[in-house]
Image (spheres, rainbow, N blue to C red):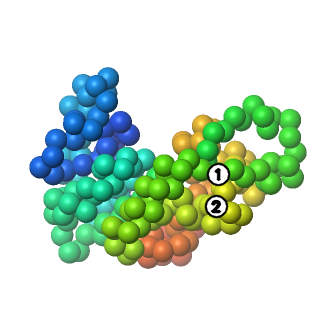
Amino acid sequence: MNDEILVHFVHTHCQIHMGPKNRLEHIMTRNKQKCTDANDIKYALRLIRQANIVILASNWDEWSARQLPSTLKLLNTKKQQKLFVIGGKSFGKVNPQLYVDKSNEYRVKQRQHPNLVAVKVNALLEQIIDPSIFVNMQKLISSEFNGTCPLFTPDGKLISYDGAHLTKYGARYIGNIIFHNKPLNSLLTTAHRREILE
């Protein structure tokens, strides 16, 4: 695969937002300084203009999620560009120490409820973002057993060490799920999928 992947990081405290409203109004005082420099999507516009595929992924706050449709318009992507929005994820509170001496058989049965805020914001995004571009990652990973999500991969590897960030095994596991479901399954050929997920 000869594709080039470029990343512009916007801290979760700063949120991805463009528009007439000042996003600093929504940001806690202690984080405002951090959010006045490169932690702003406007600094990624040059990269976005050059990209064939643009993926916006965040642990969305409700305020930025509500304003996301106008943010997407202001990104002004071209027709030939593919744009996707990935919703946030939560595995609830995770304490890896609880599972150190447990068997794989025990681990793979461990499930818990995600943070309700993540579920609520994903439900909001599902209503206001076109389904052809929105990935409700929370729904994809929590589809069974009363909306609970697994804490371990099918082979007993920890998915998230803190309930929000993925381990390398978790990233591979979640990547496998989202790239085999709509809309991201339209992005890759079978050969690309194999290369990414191996």
- Is residue 174 rendered to the left or right of residue 121? right
Q: Are marks 1 and 2 in contact (CB under 8 Å)?
A: yes
User: Residue 47 at x, y = what percent?
Assistant: 22, 52
Query: Residue 102 sits in which quadrant?
Result: top right
Residue 119 at what x, y percent from top left?
51, 56
Percent of width and height locating residue 198: 61, 60
Camera-nearest residue between 62 and 144: 62
Q: Residue at x 38, y 69 (%)?
A: 127
Residue 113's tag is 1
Is 110 rendered above or below residue 79?
above
Q: Is residue 143 visible?
A: yes
Report whether 110 appears left or right of 187: right
In-image side of 111 versus 82 (left or right): right
User: What is the crowding at mark 2: few (fewer than 14 residues within 10 Å), some, or many (at least 20)?
Assistant: some
Of callouts 1 and 2, the N-terminal one: 1
Q: Nearer the viewer, residue 42 or 192?
A: 42
Give me the disc on residue 147: 2
